[in-house]
Image (cartoon, rainbow, N blue to C red):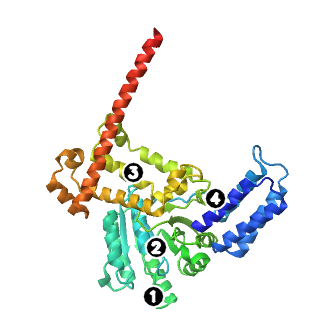
Amino acid sequence: MRDLMDAIGSIISRIRGSTLIDEETLRSILRDLQRALIRADVDVKLVYELTKSIEEEFKEAKELPPGLTAKDYLVYLLYRKLTDLLGGDKEPDVEVKTKPYILMLVGTEGSGKTTTAGKLANFYIKRGLKVGLIETDTIRPGAFDQLRQLAERVKAMFFGDPSLGNAVNIAKAGLSRMISSKADLIIIDTAGRHRNEEELLSEVKEIYEAVKPNEVMLVVDATNGKQVGAQAEAFSKYVPVNSIFITKLDSTAKGGGALVSAVKTGARIKFIGNGEDIEDIEVFNPRRFVARLMGMGDVESLLDKVKAMEEEEEVLEDIETGKFTLLTLMKQLEAMGKLGPLSRILQMLPMGLMPQLKELNDDQLMNAQDRMRKWLSILRSMTKEELLNPNILNASRIRRIAKGSGVTPRDVRELLRYYNEMSRMMSSLKKSQRRLGSLFRRFSINQGQ
C-alpha cells in the first residue's frame, strides 16, 4: 500500500500547489489518479466511474461550500469518493453481543487464517472476553501446533484432536468443549488446502451445517488484488459470507484492488492485518483509512489510542507522586504496545508533523520495536516484589529473569540502566517542579508588596 499512499499523497500535493484548477489541470490530476488506482489493481471500470463522477461533480458545483477554495473542494471530493468506494464512512460493529458467539474462519491456502485466528483471539481477550480456538485443518502439516502456540501466547483456550478423523468431528467436539468451558467467543479455523476446490468448499459447508456459526468470516490475502472478489463469490455459493478480514495489507501494491473487490461482494470488511505480529490487527474504518491514504493523518485514531493509554490512572498517579517502579515501567510499555507498530503510529500523523520522527529509517524503527518487546518479556519474568523493589535484583535473580525471558543477563542489565535513568529523570523533574513552585510563590509575594 505504500506505493498507493505515495502516489495519492503526490496528487494531493499537486492539487494544493496548483494556482488554478482549470479543466486541463483537473483532467491531468484525474489521469494521475487513474494510473495510481490501476497500478493498485483496482478494476478499470470502477476507476473510470470514480474519476468521471469526481470530474462531473466538481464542474457542476456552482457555489462552493463556505470557507472552501476550489482546491479544497477537489480534495474533499477525492476523499469522499474514495471513502464511498471502500464501503462508506461507517465503522463495522465488532462487539460480541451473543454469548457464546461462534465465529468460523474460511479462506484459501496461504491467506493467513491461522495467524488471523490468533490475532482475533488477542483482540477480543483484550476486550475482556474468554476466547476459545478450535483447529479443524487436518490437511496442512503443523496447523494444530501453530494454533496451539498462538493460543498459549495470547492465553486463549485451545482444542484440536486429529485422531477424531475429520474436520467436522473435530469442530463438533471442540464446540462442545468450549461451550462447557463457558467461552464467550469461539473461533473455528478451517483448512485452506485440498486436492481440489470442490472438496475444500464441501468441507466448509459441512462444518457450517454442523456448528451453525453466528458469523462466517472470509480471510483473504491482499496480494491477490481484485481476485479477492472471485474468492468471496466462490465461498458464498456454499456458506453465507458475513464479513471479511484482509491480511498482508502492509506488504502489497495490490491492496487497493483487494479492498475494493471485497466491498463489491456486499460483505463488510471488518478487520485488516497490517503486519505479521499478533498485535497487527485493525478495525477497518473506510473514512480513517482514506484519510491516512491521502496523507491527511489518522489523528483521530491516534488520539483514541492515546486516550486509552492515558486512562492508566495508576501509572499516572505513580509518576505524579514519584513512585516510579519497574511495575510502572511495565505498564507504560504495555500501554505503548496498544498503539501498535511505531511505523503505523507515524503513518497516522499528518505530513509535516514531527518530521524528525518521520525521517527514522525502517531499521531504526524495527530496533526500537524489538527492544520494547524484549524489555516487556524481561519485566513479565519478574516477581511482583522485584517489580516494586528493583534494589533486590542481584546477580542470581538477574540470571533467573534472563533465562525465563529468553534473553541474556546483559539485556536485563541494559533494561535496569534505562530504568535508573528514567527514575533519576522523574526525580529531577519533581525537584524542578518544586523549585518552580517556590519561585512563583516568592514572585507572587513580592508583587503583592
Mark nearer the viewer, 3 or 2: 3
Choose the circle earlier in sequence order: 2 or 4: 2
Judged left or right of residue 34, residue 276 is left
- Where in the figure is residue 140, as x and y percent of width and height? 39, 84
- Where in the figure is residue 223, as x and y percent of width and height? 55, 76
Considering every residue shown, the one lying at the far bottom of the view is 195
**Which residue carries the number 2 mark?**
105
Residue at the spot 38% in from the left edge and 22% down from the top edge: 438
Cα separation between marks 3 and 1: 42 Å
**Which residue carries the number 1 mark?**
194
Choose the circle earlier in sequence order: 4 or 1: 1
Dots 2, 1 in contact, CB < 8 A: no
Mark nearer the viewer, 4 or 3: 4
Choose the circle earlier in sequence order: 3 or 1: 1
Secondary structure type for disc 2: strand
Kind of residue sitting beneath label 2: Leu
Judged left or right of residue 390, residue 286 is right
Mark nearer the viewer, 2 or 4: 4
Residue at the spot 75% in from the left edge and 53% down from the top edge: 71
**Which residue carries the number 4 mark?**
294
Q: Quadrant of the C terminus?
A: top left
Observer-nearest residue: 312 or 416? 416
For label 1, the crowd category at 10 Å Cα-Cα, with few meaning under 14, some 14 to 19 and many 20 or more, is some
